[in-house]
Amino acid sequence: MPSEMKCVALTSFREQTAQYVNWVKHWGGHLWLTRHGRPIVGVVPFHEMEVLERVLDRNDWEQKERMEEEYRKFRAAKTIQARAERARLEAGLGLHGPVHTEHIQRNIAQGYDPLRYNPSPLGGRVDRLELDDE
C-alpha cells in the first residue's frame, strides 16, 4: 500500500510540527515541505530513511562517527598547540610576533587565558578546552 503524501508550507509545518511529525510516525505518511509553493525538503518515517541510506550506499550514523573522531583529533591537536605556546611564553619566547605576545600576556594577567579556549568547528560558540596535566 503506497504511503499518503501531503504538501505543507514550511510556515504551517513550523506552527504545527508535533502534529505533522506524529502523522508521519504513526501513519507512515510523507511530507513535502514547500517554500513559495516549491518543494524544498521531505519528511519520511525513520525506517524509510534507513532503506534510503542502503539504496544510496551511505550511512549518516557512520559519517557522524567519522566527524566526531575528526573533531576529537582536532581538539587533541589544539591541546598540544596550546601546551607548546604556553611553554614558549613561560620560557620568555614570543608567540606570532611581539604584538600578539603582548596581547596574550595582557589577557592572561587580566584572568582570561586564551590558550585554554578552543573555537568550536560548529561556529559561533566557544568551548572550553581543559589542559590535562600529565
Image (cartoon, rainbow, N blue to C red):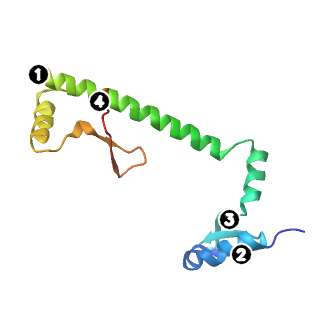
Q: Which mark is residue 133?
A: 4
78 horizontally vs 98: left or right: right
Mark 4 burial class by Cα count in 10 Å: few <14, some 14-19, many 20+: few
Quarter where residue 39 is shown: bottom right
The residues bearing labels 1 and 4 have C-alpha atoms spaced at a distance of: 21 Å
The residues bearing labels 4 and 3 have C-alpha atoms spaced at a distance of: 47 Å
Tell me, yes or no, if residue 94 can be seen here: no
Nearer to me, 6 or 70 = 70
Q: Position of residue 110 (x, y in %)?
A: 10, 44
Where disc 2 sits, the SS reads helix
Please state which of the two labelled residues, at mark 3 or mark 2, is closer to the viewer: 2
Tell me, yes or no, if residue 114 can be seen here: yes
Where is mark 2, residue-wise? 23
Where disc 4 sits, the SS reads loop
Mark 2 burial class by Cα count in 10 Å: few <14, some 14-19, many 20+: some
Q: Amino acid at mark 1?
A: Gly
37 horizontally vs 108: left or right: right
The residues bearing labels 2 and 1 have C-alpha atoms spaced at a distance of: 65 Å
The residues bearing labels 3 and 2 have C-alpha atoms spaced at a distance of: 11 Å
Q: Amino acid at mark 3?
A: Val
Quarter where residue 6 is shown: bottom right
Q: Do the residues bearing badges 2 and 1 touch, measured as CB atoms within 8 Å?
A: no
Quarter where residue 8 is shown: bottom right
Where disc 3 sits, the SS reads strand
Where is mark 1, residue-wise? 92
The residues bearing labels 2 and 4 have C-alpha atoms spaced at a distance of: 52 Å
Up the image or down, 30 lies above or below 58; here it is: below
